[in-house]
Image: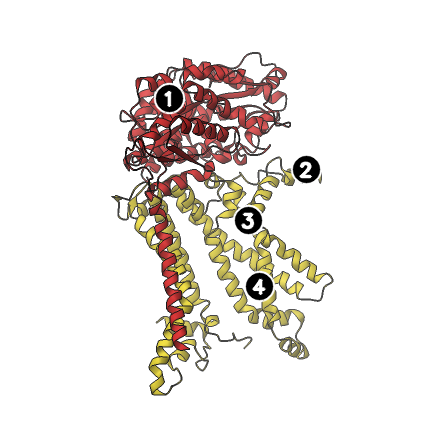
Chain colours: A yellow, B red
């Protein structure tokens, strides 16, 4: 079913395109006598090359996830082995806790707003920076700078500047816009938008760099041909550049969604350990830190971690299945009809 | 050639497995050194503290030196761990059976969890020990009639204020009731300083206002009963919230208090007091030390004063009762008996005097209280000695889980997002999570 859905959605699925799976199945035939030894050798090689990565992956990813799932079924303070089995009790509390629902809502808003604000902005900036402008290299570097700065420094800097008596409000007063001055961080009606502004400032550089790289890989011939055919600049962008930029945009959107779902550090630095819920900027991750580690409820915290993991996993799988599919199959996306 | 590759592959895999195995085994092998109640012979004790480098750490180094000298064959190995990292490290050590023999104990709900998991030893104090420690402090380390930690100092809470700013504002005597405090708030506003600084970003400093209102509204029996039942059904809990809500109406706190930290930097609540930007701050006995590091010349604030939390008319709590913290040390169940002997040693008068001087705090040994000489600490100490009872900070008393929820509820109320009843219901809901 999903297969037909996929091709139906794409409409123009290329049946002829080589697929990764096919190549592995139809390995080139080798002479009989050498086959066995070759196989053993191949397996050993695979074991040798993937062994360390598998050990690290299993030990540091799969094992902790399994443990978290196990602890999530207990009420457990972290002292001694867990004994107080509560089944799905923790999960019931999570989904009925208004604080978690709010955190989830904030995460959802951040996902959507990040895509809506950063996407067009990044594409626009990338198009601009793909032109021959004076000081292009410098602007490219400058736009990328915020992304390089550590979250802790960004968070500390903004939390100082955005205080009621901080630099931002002072500057507003000094240029005669004092009426705009407000409590940027603590006012629950504004705080989330402040956070969005900071996130945009921080991560737009990454999006722009990705888009620029995507733009560079689009052959000039296509737009040249279009221009010869009489297409305007905007028509070229709309009908050639944007469609060919599709794979890049989709990958960026994927990274952005996952990053938004797991957002933690900026909120934790700016709003501290406790008050993000009050200010209306809590996320699932800050909820987990507050109700798990800080409260000493390691069982409950593990259950929250599992919920977060599942939400991220489902979103990621759906996105891969329905959006990234054509890119992952290695086919070049088609441009204009 | 192929054989070589295979051998190399096996060797590499084997190495990987060995590395992983040894990494897992690391914790178990460094278990308890003494094992049971050894005496004589050579004993090595591990000792974990959250003291930071400076006078505090020097005190412990000296104490260990003199204890080791008096007890041949005993060696104490100290490890100081940064305060914010401490709980996690201790918890890991306790869980992996590599607990230190003697360790810093926060008390309250955390201690209860350790007791329930048999990770802390009950202590039997001799008559001499009992004489060296105030009964009130010891009561704070007692669960079900057994003592699980030796208290070192007491940190009673009260309001620290700037005498200069009070004089400027025309305040002649410190307030003893909430209406008086509200009048002083108005006077301080008139001279353009923030009346009261509070570091609500850290939540607990804001919540301490609620704790103290609860201390005045609720009887000692009610507060103690809540520690085990974790039920907040008595109307006094909501009444305390109403008191706080009424107090908030006079806007006593500095602008932007919700994103103000408590102790770090000149913009923190302690920094505001240190730089005469705010008149008062409700804080534990460590505050003069914190303020001293934030004054422009990094010296103690000369005009700092102290008064106890004002009385609330009609409350069921004793007006002399005090809220406070206790720093103590616990012993692991498998620790050699010398571990407890070291704690007994720390309670002796000379050690307590040195402790109080090093940490600028109030010792639990009354004979050592003579070293407390600065006027601020003396007034706090006098109030403490007069207090009919002391109550630990509620986020310790009721455990961090319920404590966090109380704190969050109070911050919500202060931010105009919550109600007094919301504080109580948040605490009740949190009890279900832990």
Question: Residue A242 got which mark?
Answer: none
The chain that hosts pointer 2 is A
Q: Are marks 1 and 3 on the same chain?
A: no
Q: Which residue is mark 2?
A: A173
Q: Which residue is mark 1?
A: B137
**Total label count?**
4
Q: Which residue is mark 3?
A: A151
Q: Camera-side residue: B334 or A133? A: B334
Label 4 element class: helix
Q: CA distance from mark 4 to mark 3?
A: 20 Å
**Is A27 displayed left or right of B307 in the figure?**
left
Q: CA distance from mark 2 to mark 3?
A: 28 Å
**Is B229 displayed left or right of B368 in the figure?**
left
Q: Which residue is mark 4?
A: A210
Q: Position of residue B357 (x, y in %)?
A: 50, 22
Q: Quadrant of the N terminus of chain B?
A: bottom left
């Amino acid at each position: 079913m999903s297969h037909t859905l996929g091709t139906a959605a794409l409409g123009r699925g290329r049946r002829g395109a080589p697929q990764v799976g096919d190549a592995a199945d139809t390995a080139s035939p080798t002479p009989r006598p050498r086959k066995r030894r070759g196989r053993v050798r191949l397996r050993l090689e695979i074991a040798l090359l993937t062994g360390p990565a598998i050990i690290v992956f299993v030990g540091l990813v799969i094992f902790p996830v399994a443990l978290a799932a196990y602890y999530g079924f207990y009420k457990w303070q972290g002292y001694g082995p867990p004994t107080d089995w509560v089944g799905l009790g923790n999960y019931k509390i999570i989904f009925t806790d208004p604080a978690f629902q709010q955190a989830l809502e904030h995460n959802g808003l951040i996902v959507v707003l990040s895509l809506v604000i950063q996407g067009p902005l990044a594409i626009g900036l990338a198009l601009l920076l793909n032109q021959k402008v004076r000081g292009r290299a410098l602007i490219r570097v400058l736009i990328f700078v915020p992304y390089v700065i550590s979250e802790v420094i960004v968070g500390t800097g903004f939390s100082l500047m955005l205080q009621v008596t901080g630099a931002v409000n002072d500057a507003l007063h000094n240029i005669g816009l004092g009426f705009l001055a407000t409590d940027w961080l603590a006012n629950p009606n504004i705080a989330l938008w402040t956070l969005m502004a900071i996130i945009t400032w921080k991560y737009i550089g990454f999006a722009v760099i990705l888009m620029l790289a995507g733009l560079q890989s689009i052959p000039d011939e296509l737009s040249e041909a279009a221009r010869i055919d009489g297409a305007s600049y905007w028509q070229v962008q709309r009908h050639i550049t944007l469609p060919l930029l599709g794979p890049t945009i989709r990958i960026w959107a994927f990274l952005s969604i996952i990053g938004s779902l797991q957002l933690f550090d900026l909120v934790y630095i700016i709003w501290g350990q406790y008050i993000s819920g009050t200010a209306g900027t809590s996320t699932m991750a800050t909820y987990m830190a507050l109700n798990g580690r800080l409260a000493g409820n390691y069982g409950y915290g593990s259950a929250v971690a599992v919920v977060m993991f599942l939400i991220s996993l489902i979103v990621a799988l759906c996105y891969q299945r329905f959006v990234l599919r054509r890119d992952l199959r290695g086919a070049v996306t088609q441009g204009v009809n | 050639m192929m054989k070589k590759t295979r051998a190399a592959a096996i060797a590499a895999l084997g190495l990987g497995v060995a590395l992983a195995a040894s990494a897992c085994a690391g914790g178990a092998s460094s278990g308890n050194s003494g094992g049971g109640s050894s005496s004589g012979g050579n004993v090595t004790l591990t000792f974990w503290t959250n003291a930071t480098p400076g006078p505090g750490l020097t005190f412990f180094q000296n104490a260990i030196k003199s204890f080791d000298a008096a007890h041949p064959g005993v060696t104490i190995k100290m490890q100081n761990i940064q305060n914010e990292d401490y709980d996690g490290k201790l918890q890991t050590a306790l869980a992996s059976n590599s607990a230190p023999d003697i360790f810093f104990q926060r008390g309250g709900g955390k201690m209860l969890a350790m007791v329930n998991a048999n990770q802390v030893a009950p202590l039997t104090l001799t008559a001499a020990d009992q004489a060296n420690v105030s009964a009130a402090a010891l009561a704070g380390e007692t669960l079900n009639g057994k003592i699980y930690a030796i208290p070192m100092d007491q940190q009673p809470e009260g309001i620290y204020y700037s005498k200069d700013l009070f004089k400027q504002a025309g305040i002649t005597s410190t307030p003893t009731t909430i209406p008086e405090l509200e009048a002083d708030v108005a006077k301080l506003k008139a001279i353009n300083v923030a009346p009261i600084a509070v570091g609500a970003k850290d939540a607990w400093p804001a919540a301490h206002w609620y704790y103290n209102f609860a201390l005045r509204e609720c009887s000692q029996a009610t507060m103690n009963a809540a520690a085990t039942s974790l039920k907040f059904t008595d109307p006094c809990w909501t009444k305390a919230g109403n008191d706080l809500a009424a107090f908030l109406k006079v806007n006593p706190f500095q602008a932007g208090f919700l994103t103000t930290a408590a102790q770090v930097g000149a913009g923190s609540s302690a920094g505001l007091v240190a730089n005469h930007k705010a008149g008062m701050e409700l804080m534990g006995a460590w505050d003069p030390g914190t303020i001293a590091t934030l004054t422009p010349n990094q010296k103690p604030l000369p005009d700092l004063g102290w008064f106890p939390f004002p009385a609330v008319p009609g409350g069921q709590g004793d007006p002399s009762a005090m809220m406070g913290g206790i720093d103590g040390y616990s012993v692991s169940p498998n620790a050699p008996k010398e571990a407890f002997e070291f704690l007994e040693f720390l309670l002796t008068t000379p050690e307590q005097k040195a402790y109080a001087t090093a940490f600028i705090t109030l010792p639990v040994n009354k004979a050592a209280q003579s070293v407390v000489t600065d006027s601020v600490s003396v007034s706090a100490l006098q109030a403490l000695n007069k207090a009919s009872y002391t109550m630990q900070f509620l986020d310790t008393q009721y455990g961090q889980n319920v404590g966090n929820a109380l704190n969050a509820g109070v911050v919500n109320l202060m931010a105009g997002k919550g109600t007094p009843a919301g504080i109580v219901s948040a605490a009740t809901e949190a009890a279900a999570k832990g």
